[in-house]
Image (cartoon, coloured by chain):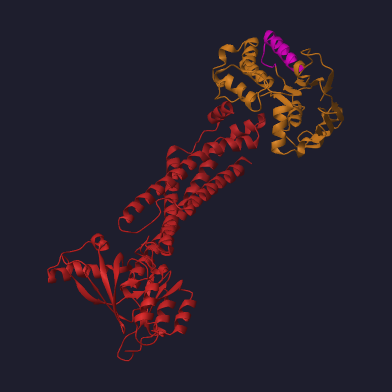
Amino acid sequence: MANMFQLQNIIPQTLRDRPSMMHSGIWGKLVQLNPSECIKITAPSGTGKTTLIHFLYGLRNDYTGHILYQQQSLAQLSGEAIAVWRQQEYSIVFQDLRLFPQLSARENIELNRVLQNPYCLPAAVEEMADELGITHIMQQPVHQCSYGEQQRIAIIRALVQPFNWLLMDEPFSHLDQANTSKAIALIERACKKRNAGMLVTNLDDDCFFNYTSTYHL
Amino acid sequence: MRQLNSILTKLIRNRAGKAKMVMAMVALSAALLLLLISVQLQVNYHQLLNQPNGRDSIADFLVINKQLNDGSMSNTTIADAQVKQLAQQLFVDAVGVLTPSRFKASIESKSSSFPFYTDISFESVGADFIDIPGVEWTWQEQSDYIPIIVPNQFLDFYNFQFSFSQNLPQLSPAILKMLVFKVNIYGPKGAISLNGKIVGFSDRIAALLVPEEFMQWGNKVFASGEKGAVSRVIIKTKDPTNPALSSFLKRNQLTTDNQKMRFSKYRKLVDTVIAISGITGILLLVFALLIFTLMIQLTISSAQSEIVLLVTLGASPKQLSRFLMRQFFPPNVWVIVGSTVVVGILQFLLQQVLSSQQIMLSAWLSAYTVGTALLLGVLVWWVNKISIRKYIG
């Protein structure tokens, strides 16, 4: 199938000696993440949630086994090919956000919008900012924003590009209940519009989305 | 694309500093100027040396005759075999035979207000060896007049010596070229008078020159005795200072105009200066390219964390390379275009100055110079591209 992740016996080199590997639902197993699925990965700290997200995003290759996307091994992709996938196939909300502190909130979002042929208009960005309540800080350099504001900037940044998968690593960790609800509604709409799948990691059980599968690391 | 570039400009600034940028630009400008000037001057020399009829003062045409001494008097003939041998030498581009008149002749004024009369002799040479542009260097029996080229030295002799001693007016080249005078030719069957007219003045051959057709006719109709032997030839050579030329002349007991050989030594000096200028230009170019490479390296390494995050977010290496090329290459293009324009202006000014001295050059840059500028542009582009690819990779 086209936009499907296949994880074939993945063992991270940094975690291979840990006893928790034996009981993982992902590590060392054959796992298929089907298109348009809403998947939850849950596990305590230090068991490799961020590592898994980075493996799927093609940021790290320090594992044994294979990760296939569109039947191609992520580890063997060229820099140009992985860039095309990051622009067109999957988007991400990092746990550590990875914003440019010297740029304004708007510039951080705009950068991801114009890296490829823009998927949405600037007006749509303003609507999303309004929905998440960060319109007033759009001109502000990111380093002057609170962590909660930065998290909302990172979420909007992930939603302005085309994607078939949205990878999110503890995306609401610094948001209150009200802002989390707004962000969830926005994300659900964006994924539905694209018919995209999503993969969310979190420390605990949650009911943010209507998950179709849940895996414990 | 504009929005992306504007954001990238904020993230990847040129951290090398304006001073280094200015230094690199100055070095590149100096390098390009020296290189393009060297190429253009070489082309100018080539043009002056090889134009067949151009009136130039530095072409290397040498008149060669036998050394005249007590032993060789009345035996100054250059054999046909020797002329052929001369033509075969690598340092000789062309050989022309100077044919002397073997009949008595005189010229005299047709005007009583400016009377003159003098016995005279002529020499003829092929049209390829004369340096008067725009002259029809030919003659037929029906022609209105015999075209004659006079050495500049003759004119100087008349104007600055003879006219004073004989109380005659000084004559400018323009006035002399308007005069039509009688050319009397004497033969066994009597004398005839033809019209003669000066068509130009030359420094190349110290003789009154007439077209070969006239000389053949005159020698055939009026000369006494057998066909005359060759005693002077003219050669065209690229380098009169070539040791092979002087040793050939010495070996065959020939001699030539030492003054011209001395002049061509100055040309050798100029050639050396051009070579030094070219080498300096190349060294400066290497220096400038090195600074550019270092600037690119410095900019990329100082924006390393931003570049890593850009790639993490999905910026492709090609996108970043394209952006960096836009940052670094356009100033180089301006320097190349500017240097080419400056050399073009210098060439135009040189042409203006030299044309007043009857040295004819093109007012435009040569194709070689423009081609060199383009090649250097490609070289700078390539060095930029390779440096960016290396450090982005």
Residue B309: quarter of image = top right
Q: Residue at x 43, y 69 (%)?
A: B238
Count of labels in the image: 0
Asked which quadrant contains residue A19, the reply is top right
- Of B99 and A110, nearer the camera is B99
> In this rendering, would A44 be left or right of A94?
right
Front in this rendered view, residue B345 or B24? B345
Q: Taking B227 as reference, is A174 left or right?
A: right
Q: Is residue A164 visible?
A: yes
Left or right, residue B114 beside residue A92:
left
**Among the 4 quarters of the image, the one containing residue A146:** top right
Chain appearing in orange on the rendered image: A
Give the residue at the far top of this rendering. A178
Residue furthest toward the right?
A30
The percent position of residue B328, horizontal first and vertical second, equals 52, 39
Give percent across and percent down for residue B237: 43, 71
Q: x and y percent of residue B257 in the render?
A: 33, 75
Say left or right for A112 vs A16.
Answer: left
Residue A24 visible within the image: no
Predominant SS of the magenta segment: helix
Which quadrant of the rendered structure holds the N terminus of chain B? Answer: top right
Please state which of residues B319 and A212 is positioned toward the viewer in this rendering.
B319
For chain B, the rendered hue is red
**Image height of B127 relative to A136, above or below:** below
Q: Residue at x 56, y 14 (%)?
A: A137
Q: Residue at x 54, y 27 (%)?
A: B6
Q: Is residue A201 above or below residue B96?
A: above
Q: Does B60 sit above or below residue A110?
A: below
Q: In what quadrant of the picture does the C terminus of chain B appear? A: top right
> Which residues are drawn in magenta?
A172-191
Coordinates of residue B310 in the picture (x, y in percent): 63, 31
Q: Residue B130: say if magenta.
A: no
